[in-house]
Image (spheres, helix red, strand yellow):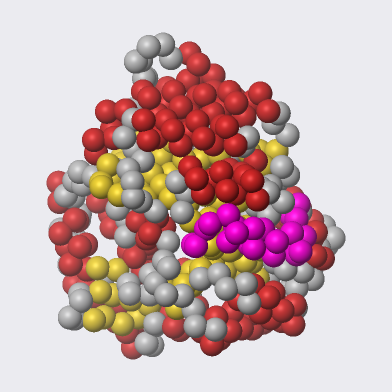
Amino acid sequence: MMMENKNVQPWKQYQALYLHIPFCVQKCLYCDFASYAGFGEQAKRDYTDAVCKEIALRAAEAANMAANASIYFGGGTPSVLPTECIAKLVNALKQYGFWQQPCEATIEVNPGTADLAKLQTLRSLGFDRISFGVQSLQDDELRAIGRIHNAQQALEALALARKAGFARISADLIYGLPSQTLTSLQDTLERLADTGIEHISVYGLIVEDGTPLASLVDKGRITLPDDDTAADMYELVQSFLRERGFERYEISNYAKNGQYSRHNTVYWEYHPYMAFGAAACGFDGQRRRTGLSTVKEYIGQLQSFGGDDLRASALYNVEKLSCAELLEEFMFMGLRRSEGASLAEARERFGVDVLQRFASELAPLFEQKLIAYDASTQRLRLTERGMEVGNQIFEVFVIT
């Protein structure tokens, strides 16, 4: 059955806003994100001014923001920006109506890049949620992947965030690291859980082509855990966090007391979100809009704009998605959530009956108990077994 874009229902309001800070103290060996080390203070200030200009030039779009839409400052490492630059960005978003109170407002911070005074300032600016790139609490594992902090600094950062007034604190971890063992992973999980934080994201290490880590692995200078050990690590993460009272609400995310990331839930629900900054990607429900990828290009283009002149074609790459692509991404994202993808919403937004359209592909997955359907909620979800092979299941929804 051919799916046509005329079936796609437009969305009128953005549910979230992402602002990209592409600077790092040092790029991690595994990272393939749009982030850069080595920029001086002037470049950071120029970048801040450029983002503020983009915010001002797009002021009319604030009318399309949903009430209490979430805010997320990501990177890179947002906390490497001078405090006054972060304040300037926050104030611009508030001035032009993009940041509406109350809302969930998250900022990413790497341990070692923010002291108590800076964390207190972030809290006073309106950030109510903070996400730390901990990755491990073993010093040798942190060194092996090029992190700038050690385990003690990570634990101190979590404690300082609490002292600064953050009630919502999240930490990222990675398993499958060089030199990591089941014992060291268990120790990291225990020490992190003992801090009392209520949100943890855990990812399996992916060796991306073109990264320094890929080169080191190819040359045999770094050895990673074998597949069986990585699978055991995955099982350890699931059992440990479950026993410690964390709910797995998404493939890689775990929370206590309903402390879900509202911002990331917007992505998983495939709802529209705005984006500002170099390489920042936004989505309006039908089109994806991505900013210029390098800091130099982005700053130069914004500096060339005069008055209220915004030549979108010069600042963004806009990709209009087909109905098939939209449905594919909707299912990919929705199935990441433990409650699954809403097939009622798929029908409403894309005019497609998923169970009927993919009946032959889904039948063996139901048989193997990799997926389940709840007729009362009209949601299709991955089972625990299905989450282990999620990427294979997602391929079912690729329409060529």
| Residue for point 24% across, 35% down | 63
Q: Is residue 305 above or below residue 67?
A: above
Q: Quadrant of residue 30?
A: bottom right
The number of numbered badges drawn on the structure is 0
Q: Is residue 256 left or right of residue 140?
A: left
Q: Position of residue 291 (x, y in %)?
A: 46, 33
Q: Residue at x 69, y 31 (%)?
A: 39
Quarter occupied by the N terminus: bottom left
Q: Quadrant of the C terminus?
A: bottom left
99 in relation to 145, above or below: above
Q: Residue furthest top?
A: 306
Q: Is residue 276 visible?
A: yes
- Residue 157 colored in magenta in the image: yes
The spot of residue 140 in percent (x, y) is: 82, 65
Query: Which of 157/325 is in front?
Result: 157
Q: Nearer the viewer, residue 84 or 337?
A: 84
Tell me what residue is drawn at x 60 percent, y 59 percent.
Answer: 163
Is 100 colored magenta in this rendering?
A: no
Identify the magenta region. Answer: 147-168
Q: Nearer the viewer, residue 171 or 205?
A: 171
Q: Residue at x 25, y 47 (%)?
A: 67
Q: Is residue 13 above or below residue 196?
A: above
- Place residue 244 in its image quadrant: bottom right
Q: Does the rendering let one see residue 288?
A: no
Above/below status of 379 relative to 89? below
Specify whether 233 is left or right of 104: right
Residue 277 drawn at (x, y percent): 48, 34
